[in-house]
Image: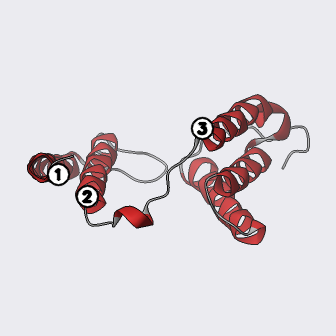
Amino acid sequence: MSRSRLAGINWAAVALAGVGVVAAVESLRLGIGRPVEPGPGLLPLAAAAVLVGSCAAVVARDRVPDEAVREVGRAERLAASLVLLCAALALEPLGYRVTMLSTVTLLARVLGVRRWLVAAAFGAVAAFGSDVLFSDLLGMALPRGSWRL
């Protein structure tokens, strides 16, 4: 991609990030509520945060040297798709925690984490952290599986 086109994309990302910041400020005026009782501004605030984060990633992408970026091959994409399909099928019988722990661990391995221990630690933090967020803080009922974990 040419330098002028990349500069145009970066300016567009910066402009969209500005829109995201304005949306975040306006959503705070609506009130975000409490963790158990979310307010009307929580979802717009989350959407604005995703927008700003995505724009920051687009701008930061140009700062990363091409050698540092690893291409994901067809076999890795297929393996990741297979892991996600198995996760969808295993969610009810195995429960949220076990399914997310194994899914995130396997995805980390497929997408480049070299050591199983690091991938498993990442999977455990993601699985149990999201379980606390969704079930305890937001009060959502997550599948517990036949083991009731």
Residue at (16% x, 50% y) in the render: 6
Q: Which residue is found at the position 79% from the left and 34% from the top?
A: 90
Res. 74 mark:
3
Total numbered labels: 3
Mark 1 or mark 3: which comes first in sequence? 1
Name the spot of residue 142 as percent of width and height, x first.
69, 40
Q: Which residue in the structure is indicated by mark 2?
A: 56
Mark 3 surroundings: few (<14), some (14-19) or many (≥20) residues within 10 A:
few
Q: Position of residue 132 (x, y in %)?
A: 63, 57
Q: Tell us which disc is closer to us: 1 or 3.
A: 3
Mark 1: which secondary structure? helix
Kind of residue sitting beneath label 1: Ala
119 shown above or below 39: below
148 to the left or right of 43: right
Q: Position of residue 65 (x, y in %)?
A: 33, 67
Q: How far across and down, in percent of the image, does residue 34 sit?
A: 41, 53
Quadrant assignment, res 66: bottom left
Element marked by disc 3: helix
Q: What residue appears at the point 34 percent right and 44 percent down from the top-left corner?
A: 39
Q: Is 98 placed left or right of 63 in the picture? A: right
C-alpha separation, residue under disc 1 versus residue under disc 3: 33 Å
Q: Nearer the viewer, mark 1 or mark 2?
A: 2
Task: Verify CB contact (< 8 Å) between mark 1 and mark 2.
Answer: yes
Kind of residue at badge 3: Arg
Give the camera-side residue of 52 and 40.
Answer: 52
